[in-house]
Image (cartoon, rainbow, N blue to C red):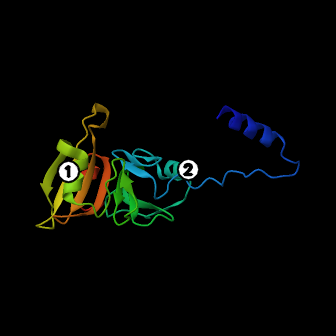
Amino acid sequence: MRQAFVGTIVGLCLLPVGIAIAQPPKQSPKLTEASQVGTNGLGPVLVGMTVAEAEKAAGRKFNTDKEGPAGMTCLYSQPQGLPGIGFMVVDGRIARIDVWSNRKITTFRGAKIGDSEARIKQLYGKQIQVQQHEYDPKGHYLVFVPKDKADRNFRVVFETDGQKVTRFRSGKLPEVEYVEGCA
């Protein structure tokens, strides 16, 4: 093994002049469909950031609603090129992350849209609280309540049709519990 390693080093030193060594690929945006949802953010975009800070962290522009519902300072901002997700912005700062339809986005534990209620309970164990869905009599909210004191004001909420996750969201209290988003 040692000889093979030494031979590789000698071989690399003997490369003819003018041979190009492969360069690393250009860095992709920092926020991608491989980014994961935690209690306080999605990839590099964290609760508490302004939209400008989120765009810089994400490495991509966001499309932001011009205004929220009458009398509210709540609106949504969506990263360009990442369909089916949005960031709730309250008083100029991100308060929660919504995954409406993007089946590639997962939580740190691997939960995603389409997972069964049983899988969510398996992934999160006793930290899941089951609540009745506001509009679907068969559906539920499976609410992940963190044990960490630092995360005590955050949640991940999985909405189900009674069998499978149809959407999910994470963020800070009370915004993460708003059933109708900014409405």
Image location of residue 22, percent across then percent down = 73, 52
43 horizontally vs 152: left or right: right
Q: Which mark is residue 173?
A: none
Tell which of 11 and 139 is nearer to you: 11
Q: How many marks?
A: 2
Q: Amino acid at mark 2?
A: Lys
* Disc 1, SS: helix
Q: Which mark is residue 56?
A: 2
Q: Amino acid at mark 1?
A: Lys
Quarter placement of the N terminus:
top right
Image location of residue 128, percent across then percent down = 19, 47
Q: Residue at x 51, y 64 (%)?
A: 80
Q: Dot 1: within a 10 Å radius of its alpha carbon, few (fewer than 14), some, or many (20 or more) residues?
A: some
* Disc 2, SS: helix
Alpha-carbon distance for marks 1 and 2? 35 Å
Q: Residue at x 51, y 48 (%)?
A: 53
Sequence-wise, which precedes: disc 1 or disc 2? 2
Q: Residue 73, relative to residue 150: is it above or below?
A: below
Tell which of 104 and 11 is nearer to you: 11
Q: Dot 2: within a 10 Å radius of its alpha carbon, few (fewer than 14), some, or many (20 or more) residues?
A: some
Quarter placement of the C terminus:
bottom left
Task: Answer whether residue 96 is visible to the viewer in this image.
Answer: yes
Q: Residue 146, relative to residue 57: is it above or below?
A: above
Q: Residue furthest right?
A: 17
Q: Residue at x 87, y 51 (%)?
A: 18
74 horizontally vs 115: left or right: right
Q: Residue at x 36, y 44 (%)?
A: 40
Q: Which residue is mark 1?
A: 121
Task: Answer whether residue 179 is visible to the viewer in this image.
Answer: no
Image location of residue 122, percent across then percent down = 22, 49
Image location of residue 102, percent across then percent down = 38, 64
74 horizontally vs 124: left or right: right
